[in-house]
Image (cartoon, rainbow, N blue to C red):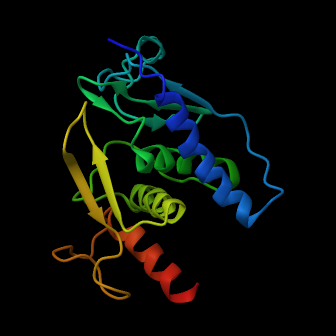
Amino acid sequence: MELDKAAPFAILDSIYQAMKKVRDADSSAVFPKLKANWSIYNVPAGTGSEYELRSGLIGTTHFDGDGNLYILGDADSDTDEYDDHVIIHEWGHYFEQSFSRADSIGGPHGSGDRLDIRVAFGEGWENAFSAIVQIIQYILILKGLGSLVVSSMDYRGGGKSGYPKGLTFSWKELLCPKAFLIILDYFF
């Protein structure tokens, strides 16, 4: 595997965008230490043991709640260093834990899942935060080297009222960022 020399700078740029958005609101914000663990050997495998994490078996890109951000980097399976939304979303977990209160129990989740309200809120907040930082409506997530879009979410679709078509009112990851962005659009 060849090292992508620009990847660490892309990750730092995403983190910088998020930090700048916070600093724009509060210039005195002091950020606790965060270590971004990225490698071309980080793959979507493993159970999360310390040994596996050190070996690159990180499961998925995630913030571990202990000051570590793990980022997928194996171009043959999945890579997140250029997925700004993913990096900022995970940085949002760090931000929420460092400057607020994070009640999420974590665990696997997807946009169509019925979730524990704590997970739905936490993931929804992070998705909304990422959209706010990037001032975007659509989130595109890439998978692998030179791949096409595998995931696309419209957070502002449907105007200032309602929620995405086909979504019933249960605690779903997509509903929370939609609600945050409706409030942002309406009041600010």
- Image location of residue 187, percent across then percent down: 56, 87
- Residue 77 higher or lower than 116, as above or below: above
Q: Could one spot residue 100 in this view of the protein?
A: no
Quadrant of the frame with the N terminus: top left
Count of numbered circles on the image:
0
Q: Identify which residue, 148 or 52, lies in the foreground.
A: 148
At 31% from the left edge and 43% from the top edge, which residue is drawn? 108
- Residue 81 higher or lower than 149, as above or below: above
Rendered image quadrant of residue 45: top left
Task: Classify residue 22 as left or right of residue 127.
Answer: right
At 28% from the left edge and 83% from the top edge, which residue is drawn? 158
Q: Residue furthest front?
A: 6
- Image location of residue 84, percent across then percent down: 44, 47
At 15% from the left edge and 75% from the top edge, which residue is drawn? 166
Q: Residue furthest right?
A: 28
Rendered image quadrant of residue 12: top right
Quadrant of the frame with the C terminus: bottom right
- Image location of residue 65, percent across then percent down: 56, 37
Q: Could one spot residue 81 in this view of the protein?
A: yes
Q: Residue furthest left?
A: 166
Task: Classify residue 149 as left or right of residue 162.
Answer: left
At 21% from the left edge and 48% from the top edge, which residue is drawn? 149
